[in-house]
C-alpha cells in the first residue's frame, strides 16, 4: 500500500525532518510506504556528486532573492525547487516492491518506475515525455531544438528505505533555473507542464496534480493508493500500530568472542 499526503507549501528543512521521521516509522512497521507531495520556497540543493561551481549566482544574489542552499545526500548534482513545482518524497521500503518480472526492486528499478509514473502524468495532459538513455529524469522530446527536462529525480537509499525523490515543473518560474547549471549538464534546457500544454490556464491546481501523480505511482508500482488527510492522521495511525518487536531480554547484546572469531575465519577471503 502507498499512503500519500499533500502538504502544500513546506519549508525545505521541514521536508528533510519529515522524511527522517517517516523513515523511522516505516522501519518500525508503524506506517506503510508513504509518498509526501508538496512544494518549496526557492531553494538550491546539492547532491552527493554536485560541484559548487554549478551554482552560477553569487551568494549575495541568492541572499537578495531569498534562495537558500542545502548540501544533501541524494544522488545527482544541483537542483532548483520553487513555487509551482510539485516535489515528491517517496519514503518506500524497496523490499516490499517487485519488478514486472517478479524480482526484488532495486534503486535503479525504482528510479525507472518513478520516471514511468511521471511520463504517464504528462501523458494525462496530452504532453509527450520520455526517458533519455544515460540520463536520469523525464524529458520532453526535441522539436527543432534540444530535449527539455520537465522532471528531475534524485534519491537516497539507506537500509532499503528510499528518501528524496522528484521535482516536477508545473507552473515553475523557469527563469530561476538560470541560477544554476541544472543537474550539472551544460546547455541543459528545462520546461514545465504550463509551457508544454496548449491551454496552461486550464491546468488544475498543484494539489489536484499531486493526486494524479499519486494515482500514477500506484499504477506503476502495483500498489493500492490511500490518501491520508494530514500529518496528524498519519501520526495517530502510527501511534496505534503494534509496537515493534524488540529482542528478548536474554538475547546477548554482543556475540561471544568465540563466535566472533569463528565468523571472522569464515569471512576471510580464500586465496588461490
Image (cartoon, rainbow, N blue to C red):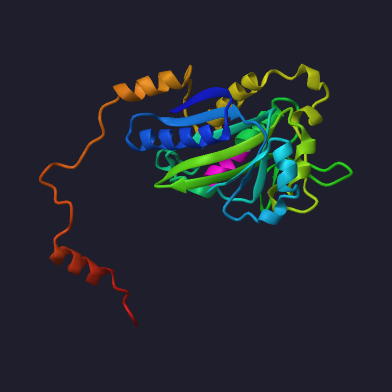
Q: At which x and y percent is residue 27?
A: 35, 38
Q: In percent of the image, x 51 and y 32: which residue is there?
A: 14
Does residue 148 show up? no
| Residue placed most toward the observer, 135 or 38 | 38
| Residue placed most toward the observer, 236 or 134 | 236
Quadrant location of residue 168?
top right
Q: In percent of the image, x 32 and y 23: which residue is there?
A: 239
Q: Is residue 100 magenta?
A: no
Left-right relation of 262 to 17: left
Q: At which x and y percent is residue 42?
A: 67, 34
Q: Give the magenta-colored segment's residue range.
A: 109-115
Relative to 19, is 6 above or below? above
Instruction: Please state, as top left, top right, bottom left or bottom right, where the C terminus lies in the image.
Output: bottom left
Furthest-right residue in this view = 144
Relative to 184, is 223 above or below? above
| Residue placed most toward the observer, 173 or 219 | 173
Left-right relation of 271 to 68: left
Q: In percent of the image, x 49 and y 32: which residue is there?
A: 222
Instruction: Please state, as top left, top right, bottom left or bottom right, where the N terminus lies in the image.
Output: top left
Quadrant location of residue 178?
top right
Secondary structure mostly seen in magenta is: helix
Q: At which x and y percent is residue 99?
A: 49, 42
| Residue placed most toward the observer, 70 or 169 | 70
Furthest-left residue in this view = 250
Furthest-bottom residue in this view = 272
Q: At which x and y percent is residue 39?
A: 62, 29
Tell how many labels: 0
Does residue 4 show up? yes
Amino acid at each position: 500500500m502507498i499512503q500519500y499526503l499533500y502538504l502544500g507549501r513546506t519549508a525545505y528543512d521541514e521536508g528533510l525532518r519529515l522524511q527522517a521521521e517517516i523513515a523511522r516509522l516505516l522501519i518500525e512497521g508503524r506506517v506503510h510506504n508513504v509518498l509526501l507531495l508538496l512544494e518549496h520556497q526557492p531553494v538550491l540543493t546539492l547532491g552527493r556528486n554536485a560541484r559548487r561551481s554549478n551554482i552560477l549566482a553569487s551568494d549575495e544574489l541568492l541572499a537578495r532573492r531569498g534562495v537558500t542552499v542545502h548540501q544533501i545526500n541524494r544522488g545527482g548534482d544541483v537542483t532548483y525547487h520553487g513555487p509551482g513545482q510539485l516535489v515528491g518524497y517517496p519514503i518506500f521500503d524497496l523490499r516490499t516492491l517487485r519488478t514486472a518480472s517478479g524480482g526484488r526492486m532495486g534503486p535503479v528499478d525504482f528510479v525507472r518506475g518513478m520516471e514511468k509514473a511521471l511520463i504517464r502524468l504528462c501523458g494525462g495532459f496530452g504532453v509527450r515525455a520520455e526517458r533519455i538513455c544515460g540520463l536520469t529524469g523525464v524529458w520532453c522530446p526535441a522539436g527543432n531544438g534540444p530535449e527539455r527536462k520537465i522532471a528531475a529525480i534524485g534519491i537516497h537509499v539507506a537500509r532499503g528505505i528510499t528518501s528524496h525523490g522528484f521535482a516536477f515543473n508545473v507552473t515553475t518560474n523557469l527563469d530561476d533555473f538560470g541560477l544554476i547549471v541544472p543537474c550539472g549538464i551544460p546547455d541543459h534546457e528545462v520546461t514545465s507542464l504550463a509551457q508544454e500544454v496548449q491551454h496552461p490556464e486550464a491546468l488544475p491546481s498543484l494539489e489536484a496534480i499531486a493526486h494524479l501523480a499519486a494515482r500514477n505511482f500506484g499504477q506503476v508500482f502495483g500498489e493500492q493508493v490511500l490518501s491520508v488527510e494530514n500529518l496528524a492522521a498519519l501520526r495517530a495511525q502510527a501511534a496505534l500500530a503494534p509496537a515493534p518487536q524488540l529482542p528478548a531480554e536474554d538475547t546477548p547484546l554482543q556475540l561471544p568472542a568465540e563466535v566472533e572469531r569463528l565468523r571472522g575465519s569464515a569471512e576471510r577471503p580464500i586465496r588461490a
